[in-house]
Amino acid sequence: MQDIIAWIAVLWALSLVGFPFASGVCGLGRLADRGWAVSRVLGLLLLGWLTWIGGTLGVIPNSAGGFAGALILLGVAAVWLAHRQRVELADFFRRRWKVVATTELLFLAMFAFWALVISEVPAINHTEKPMDFGILNAVANADGFPPEDQWLSGHSIAYYYGGHHMAATLATLTGVATDKAYNLAVATVPAMLAAGLLGLVYNLLRFSGARVAPSLAVGSLAALGVVMLGNLSGVLELAYARGVGGDWFWQWVGIKGLEPPAGGDGWLPDGFWWWWRGTRVIDTLAESGVSLDYTITEVPFFSFLLGDLHAHVASLPFTALALTLALAMLVAAEPPGLDWLRRRPGEAAVLALTLGALAFINAWDFPLYIAIVAMVATAHWLSFGRRPRDLATFDLSTEEDLSIARTLTRGLGRAALLAIALAAAGVVLYLPFYVSFDSQAGGILPVTGPATRHFLFLVVMGVPAALSAGLVARSVLEMGWPTAELRKLGWPVLAVSLAPFFVWLVGVAVLVSVSASDVDLAEGLVWRRLTLAAPLLLAGGLATYCALVLSAGRRPMQWLVFALILAAAGFYLLAGAELFRISDLFGNRMNTVFKVYYQAWILLGIAGAVGFYYIVAAPIRRRWADYRAGLLRAIGIAWAAVAALLVLASAYYPAAAALERTGWFQNSESWSDNTLAGLDYLRRGQPDEYNAIVWLNEETEPGRIIEAVGDGYSDYGRISAATGRATVLGWEGHQQQWRGDDAKNLLAGRRHDVAAIYQDEDGVEVLRLLRLYDVRWLVIGPRERETYGGEVDQRMEKWVEEGWLTSAFSSGDIAIYEVRNQ
């Protein structure tokens, strides 16, 4: 409990540090909550960047003292900023204490729930957990940055480790052991994300004119929906568990693990980790059952339930911060451009820092949120440029021609320049990271495999897509019948929206012409993909069109424009995954669908929540609608009922999955045995190895280790991951993913050398290799004996007798030897 209290206390301290910056520097003071909901994330970002760049430059030690000093420095600056805003801040807390209280209660509720779930299954021993835990330990124990790769000694980590650094920062400040800090960090992510989404939707609705109470209610429900709901695969799981549907139906469904016949009478699906199937829905199965289009379709709830502190998870709270900053940009009195960078250096710096952090934490988010900022800036310029009284102030033009086409063209140019400048600044702020970063991504290719089946798409993305589609449809009604000028705008938007499909078509034609692959362009490839990608592109285009038209109106509805921009981005992302993929080691679109659908879930979830409020609570302000008010109201009620039914259906998956994962209400075990210690499974099951890890962490000086090399997603590499001590070679497959094909020879050579160290009878050669890799601690345990033979113990004792190896630790079947330097 002391660890949890210390963790929460530091997070609250970061809120208090971040709030004056949010309110007084970042432009969030113009929002209804003045940035309180994301102040915690902002405080962590500022502290994380300061300690990282300070550690990189060698001016801030990677230690509790160094980090505390950095926090005090930020605290002093925050006190000064708060003093300058003392009247505004005092008024905010006096008048808006309910906003603060609701945000903090949601944060604490989310944190408590997920901490309780994790305490049931805290073990860091499966999926990507060992990798993330290893990076966390490598960062926490690094002398400086970039940290050494725990699974490839002598090389920097070739993965975006920004999220792990944020977690390590909290662990270092609180003094919490890293195996507990790992799990506390996993629980913190949904809590900070939920708070940020609550604030974002609350601010949007307040700009719509909604009162505080309904804005907080809708914001809370939106946050819960994005964080806690699952996809509709739970409905299929329930039907399968109840024996509903004939063999033909389940054959048609085509999801692995739900093969006919269905059967049973339970209300919960059977099978260990059955909820894993919900993230592997989109696929095309051959008659033999082999996957032809294996993809990953996670949602945030699954990620939190699984417990990986992976990059796409760690970035979530920072995406909420980026969106909040973009909203503040949209509602500013002046539009953002290159001059804005000079006039608003604080806002520009924090926005660039946040966007740069997204690349540092999860590179997939960087181009997306740069594009969203550009879309927001374009909308703002269009809105601003249609107001003649403002033209002279910002020297746009002195002409009377205020056509949408001309204003939009100018706005696009200024927004593009702003996006380029912010992207460049974001890269520069994290430049040391890029110097050591190595990616195996090889560009963008057209997708030539099977297209996504419409049914499976709806199972995965049906709920947020339907809610966002409602937002777009309602916005069309708000605009009314477009004028001739607006109709002229529609054609270019339509052309640009559909352009990706034609680009894909040309790309496929080129691939077919230069390769021997047999691709059916006429039917098997083009038509099936067109029937899903085209509607998504059209939905994105219509959302874009509505956002532009509403921006150009005499009464710009910025809150609605922002939601439409998010909807457009979400639909474009989903269409993009049908057409293009990142060229990577996997050779298919698996990872592209994974990351893109994950992003779309967040964006469409936010837009859909605003859309639900818009349809249910906001009146249509067009005179023509008065004649059809009854019909429109009936349609709105029917749509709301269907949407509510879909949301309710999607709630089954998280409820049933949480019960299976935790065993709640299914066994008699007491919560008194729960723990957040991620290595507790090792302490109870393999105490000798646990004692060795504790000894290395607490009793030894820094130094590289060597342990057996084996398969990924196994117990191999566990000691290096649990200590952050770099080993010669860990999970080889991950290294190849991170570093590409160029690393194959390096990895093969290291695997050979590790085997030689454990098996070679020539002590001179073994010592040479140990010193070549600067190994200080040599591990002998069950994995080493299984991999390299039972004679390794006798061989090590022989080297001890020769005097260049010393027995340093022994516990049961684990022994650790120290290599003498001389």
Image (cartoon, rainbow, N blue to C red):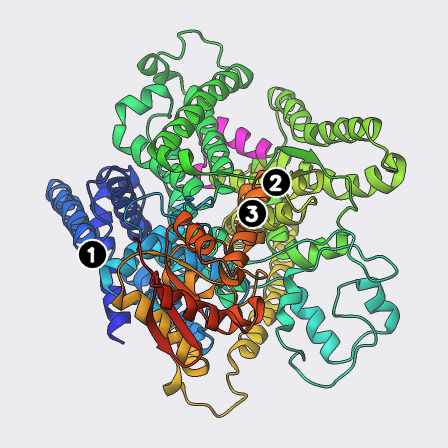
| Amino acid type, mark 2 | Asp
For the record, the magenta segment spans 544-559
Residue that extends furthest to the top in the rendered view of this protein:
399
Residue that mark 2 sits on: 741
| Amino acid type, mark 3 | Gly
Instruction: Inspect this view and state whether residue 506 appears.
Output: yes
- Closest to the camera, between mark 1 and mark 3, is 3
Residue that mark 3 sits on: 749
Separation (CA) of disc 1 from disc 3: 38 Å
- Which residue is at a point 74% across and 80% down the rendered structure image? 242
Q: Earlier in the sequence, mark 1 or mark 3?
A: 1
Q: Is mark 2 on a helix, strand or loop?
A: helix
Q: Count neighbours of disc 1 (C-alpha within 10 A) and say few if under 14, some if 14 to 19, many if 20 or more.
A: some
- Closest to the camera, between mark 1 and mark 2, is 2
CB of mark 3 within 8 Å of CB of mark 2? no
Quarter of the image that includes the N terminus: bottom left
State the image coordinates of residue 136 (x, y, percent, origin top left): 38, 57
- Which residue is at a point 34% across and 70% down the rendered structure image? 807
Q: Nearer the viewer, residue 702 or 650?
A: 702
- Which residue is at a point 27% across and 71% down the rendered structure image? 3
